[in-house]
Image: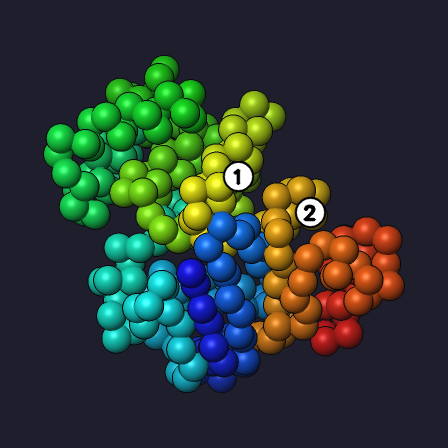
């Protein structure tokens, strides 16, 4: 479970996060929505352990992401907005490198890597260096390395960006399977149809604060709109 309480974070004169609180429960796909500059990315980076909040708390399972950063990081799989691949490594080498960073047993690492390669249909690129990969191929590598250690919490920032139709379908199936396995999935996207289709719960952030929380139907009803996109725009514009 991911729990965020009263997070605040400023960068010099800019307040990126003013007051953000939410919970992403186990066996639930939680959507995190917000316009550019809303504080969404900063909130995610605090959860990753890359940025320290000025005040408030964030926990991954029972571990505080600041005071027990390594223990918290062991329990998350992260697909960040900046993917950072090493161009001289192959796809398989990336997966296994991250597995070793997470101390996956060597006897399990090869088997687990092969499973992810098959799952994401990467057989044709698994042993090629990632230099020259398409956006979709790079995304597959990043997704597979985030899952290699079977994390109990998964944070996905725009996971279907640049993917073809078939791979997008596979990613949706993976997210559903993670949910069925009891994983807490925090899913960020600008694609309203993806959010509406995949997410059990939605959190909308605008101007550094949470402006709405609920199911798709609850969000629409709170804004008196028939579709999620119109509800999102209406709720965000109230704050801006």
Most distant residue in the left direction: 106
Q: Which of 88 and 137 is in front in this view?
A: 137
Q: Is residue 85 left or right of residue 202?
A: left
1 vs 2, front mark: 1
Mark 1–mark 2 CB contact (< 8 Å): no
How far is the residue under mark 1 from the one under mark 2?
A: 13 Å
Q: Is residue 79 left or right of residue 107?
A: right
User: Is residue 44 positioned above or below 164 on the image?
Assistant: below
User: Tag 2: Cα neighbours inside 10 Å, few (<14), some, or many (≥20)?
Assistant: some
Q: Nearer the viewer, residue 59 or 236?
A: 59
**Residue at x 22% of width, y 62% of height:** 70
User: Is residue 206 positioned above or below 122 on the image?
Assistant: below
**Residue at x 58% of width, y 66% of height:** 37
Q: Residue 39 carries which label?
A: none
Q: In this view, does 240 lie to the left or right of 86?
A: right
**Residue at x 28% of width, y 23% of height:** 114
User: Is residue 127 positioned above or below 218 on the image?
Assistant: above
- One can see residue 126 in this view: yes
| Residue 125 rendering spot, x and y as whole percentages | 35, 20
| Residue 181 rendering spot, x and y as whole percentages | 43, 42
Q: In which quarter of the image is the C terminus?
A: bottom right
Tell me which colouring the rendered structure shows.
rainbow
- To which residue does mark 2 refer? 196
Most distant residue in the top direction: 124
Residue at disc 1, secondary structure = helix
| Residue 162 rendering spot, x and y as whole percentages | 54, 34
User: Tag 1: Cα neighbours inside 10 Å, few (<14), some, or many (≥20)?
Assistant: some
**Residue at x 44% of width, y 36% of height:** 139
| Residue 156 rendering spot, x and y as whole percentages | 47, 49
- To which residue does mark 1 refer? 176
């Amino acid at each position: 479970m991911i729990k965020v309480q009263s997070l605040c974070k400023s960068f010099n004169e800019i307040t990126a996060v003013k007051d953000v609180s939410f919970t992403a429960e186990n066996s639930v796909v939680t959507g995190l929505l917000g316009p550019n500059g809303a504080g969404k990315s900063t909130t995610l980076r605090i959860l990753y352990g890359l940025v320290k909040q000025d005040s408030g708390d964030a926990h991954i399972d029972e571990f505080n992401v600041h005071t027990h950063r390594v223990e918290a990081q062991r329990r998350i799989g992260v697909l960040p907005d900046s993917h950072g691949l090493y161009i001289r490594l192959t796809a398989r080498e990336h997966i296994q490198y991250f597995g070793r960073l997470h101390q996956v047993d060597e006897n399990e690492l090869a088997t687990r890597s092969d499973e992810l390669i098959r799952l994401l249909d990467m057989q044709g690129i698994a042993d090629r260096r990632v230099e020259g990969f398409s956006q979709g191929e790079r995304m597959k590598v990043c997704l597979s390395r985030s899952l290699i250690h079977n994390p109990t919490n998964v944070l996905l920032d725009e996971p279907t960006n640049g993917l073809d139709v078939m791979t997008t379908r596979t990613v949706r199936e993976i997210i559903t399977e993670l949910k069925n396995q009891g994983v807490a999935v925090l899913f960020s996207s600008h694609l309203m149809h993806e959010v509406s289709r995949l997410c059990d719960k939605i959190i909308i952030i605008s101007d550094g604060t949470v402006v709405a929380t609920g199911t798709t139907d609850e969000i629409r009803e709170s804004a008196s709109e028939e579709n999620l996109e119109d509800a999102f725009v209406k709720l965000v514009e109230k704050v801006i």
